[in-house]
Amino acid sequence: MFKHSPVLRLLALAAVFLAGLGAMPHPGAAFESRAREALLIDATTGTVLLEKDSHRPMPPASMSKIMTVYLAFEALKDGRLSLDDKLMVSEKAWRMGGSKMFVEVGKEVRVEDLLRGVIVQSGNDACIVLAEGLAGSEEAFAELMNRKAAELGMEDSSFANSTGWPHPEQRMSPRDLATLAVRTIADFPDYYSYYAETTFTFTDIKQGNRNPLLYKNLGADGLKTGHTEEAGYGLTGSAVQDGRRLIVVVNGLKSMKERGDEAQSLINWGFREFDNYSLFAAGETVEEAPVWQGVAKTVPLVLAEDLEVTLPRRSRKKMTVSVRHDGPIPTPIEEGQEVATLVVAAPGAETVEVPLRAGASVERLGLLGRFFSNVKHLVLGGS
């Protein structure tokens, strides 16, 4: 939809997704997900391809580490932190259970190693080292996580820790996880590639990335798995094929195998059953609309941004594109003013409505001109 860099494009699309303005098709070919909660979106257009309890606040387990990493990436981008900075390992971090990077108490560890320890190894200990280094304590860092969630429009999220360790206040919805994934990719192109790394070795201990999508030849390049007894097995993933990116979130599955199979099936289905179609470029005249009592008889209707829509492939030939406005558009008209609506409809897809703007200013006729225009309208029915 946007004629800018891929980063700006993703940022704008993230805003669209957060606002809930992306098209919401009811797929012509239904897909029944085994996940307790699920969401599949086309990140290129913000379109939701499938959702199942996508607004439910759920225990995200280690998928909440995506927010921990987001805040670390933000500190790197802002210059408050560098990859070569070293952070001290506290006893709390060293004693932390669950998945570990195996840092040693009292030692200093490079930020880049800690990030890999979180992303690749899912190290709870590494999360706490980052949290304490950035905010002084994990409790203070959780507050930063909550503030950032509010800032990003993640309405169904709350954080009590940096790791995803079971806690009644540690909750995220599939929608929020997808939002955070899109923003991570858009906001940190220089650092996002860490999510695609399959192995990391620290102090002679080599561990593999738990994200099964990275090994499936799907074009996957992130993001994070999670598992606790309460949450079940979950995954937030992303894959790119032919320049088109999908984001998948699944949770509540029964095993690692089921988690990997379900996420892979959803991504394959999304790429197979849907495609993106470019309709109009920004500034391109969609239609000339008649005006009322203007110095020009018509005004060009244009889009502020490129328009690309996601549709079921089978519906492409039945797509209709129409323009809606109330009769001749009254003058005066300012260039850029919203004056009409572009409507895109197709079987199996939610109707997409996009504002159309005046491509030029049109002044109102003078008094004499308006008089003759009224006479013409009364006699001939013209404008």
Image (spheres, helix red, strand yellow):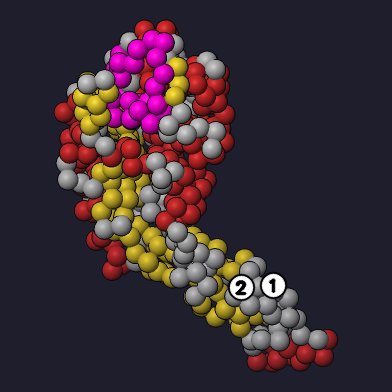
Give me the residue at 35% from left, 12% from top.
104
Residue 115 placement (x, y as % from top left): 37, 29
Question: Marks 2 and 1, how far apart in space?
Answer: 7 Å
Residue 282 placement (x, y as % from top left): 50, 69
Give yes or no for residue 181 being in the magenta stretch. no
Amino acid type at image mark 2:
Ala
Which of the numbered marks, if any, corresponds to residue 334? Answer: 1
Give me the residue at 62% from left, 66% from top.
338
Q: Is residue 128 left or right of residue 260?
A: right
Q: Residue furthest right?
A: 367
Amino acid type at image mark 1:
Glu
Q: How many marks?
A: 2
Q: Nearer the viewer, residue 35 or 259?
A: 259
Q: Earlier in the sequence, mark 2 or mark 1?
A: 1
Mark yes or no: residue 284 visible: yes
Label 1 near label 2: C-beta < 8 Å? yes
- Label 1 SS: loop
Residue 50 placement (x, y as % from top left): 32, 43
| 327 shown above or below 351 | below
Rate crowding at label 1 as few (under 14), some (14 to 19) or many (20 or more) other CA atoms within 10 Å. Answer: some
Q: Is residue 153 left or right of residue 123?
A: right
Look at the image and tell me in which quarter the N terminus lies.
bottom left
Mark yes or no: residue 226 visible: no
Label 2 belongs to which residue?
Answer: 358
Look at the image and tell me in which quarter the C terminus lies.
bottom right
* The magenta segment: 98-122
Give yes or no for residue 99 being in the magenta stretch. yes
- Label 2 SS: strand
Q: Nearer the viewer, residue 233 or 145?
A: 145
